[in-house]
Amino acid sequence: MIEAFVLVVVKPGNEEKVYNALKDCEPVKEIFRVYGEYDIILRVEVGSIGELDSFHDRILRKVRSVEMTETLIASSYKG
């Protein structure tokens, strides 16, 4: 299982529209509206990098009010 955090920048005034478009998508486990450089943060879980690619291509890139995303793939540090 791959867990990733997707940081989303939205066109001003479209935050609620983007939030509603993404909140019920299958790989999205949590979604937060945030303050600062990014407008929305998604926590997604997928089975493979290919599924993450598919999420980006099939879902994120089709939401017109999304201006930019940055994806951070989570890693477990074991000491």
Image (spheres, rainbow, N blue to C red):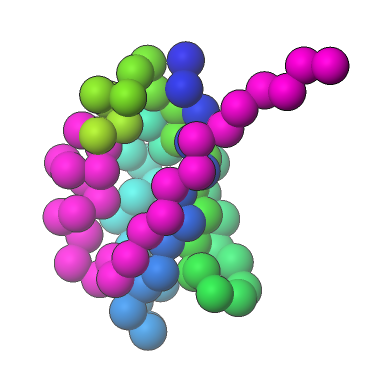
Horizontal relation, residue 60 to residue 23: left or right: left
Residue 34, quarter of picture? bottom right
**Tag count:** 0
Position of residue 1 measured from the top left corner of the image (x, y, whole percent): 47, 15
Q: Taking 66 as reference, is 2 above or below it?
A: above
Name of the residue lying farthest toward the right: 79
62 in magenta: yes
> Above or below — where is 35 with respect to 62?
below
x then y, percent, for residue 66:
29, 66
Q: Quadrant of residue 19?
A: bottom left
Magenta stretch? 54-79
Q: Residue 48 versus residue 23: which sits nearer the camera?
A: 48
Picture residue at 37% right of the left edge, 59% below the top:
69
Q: Quadrant of the C terminus?
A: top right
Left or right for 13, reference 65: right
50 lies above or below 19: above
The structure residue drawn at horizontal position 77% and vertical position 16%, both measured from the top left corner, is: 78
Where does the image place residue 76, in percent across and percent down from the top left? 67, 23
Residue visible at 20% across and 33% down?
A: 54
Residue 65 visible = yes
Residue closest to the far front: 79
Residue at horizontal 24 percent and vertical 34 percent from the top: 53
Above or below, 17 relative to 62: below
> Residue 31 in the image: x percent, y percent?
51, 49
User: Taking the image as drawn, is residue 29 in sight?
Assistant: no
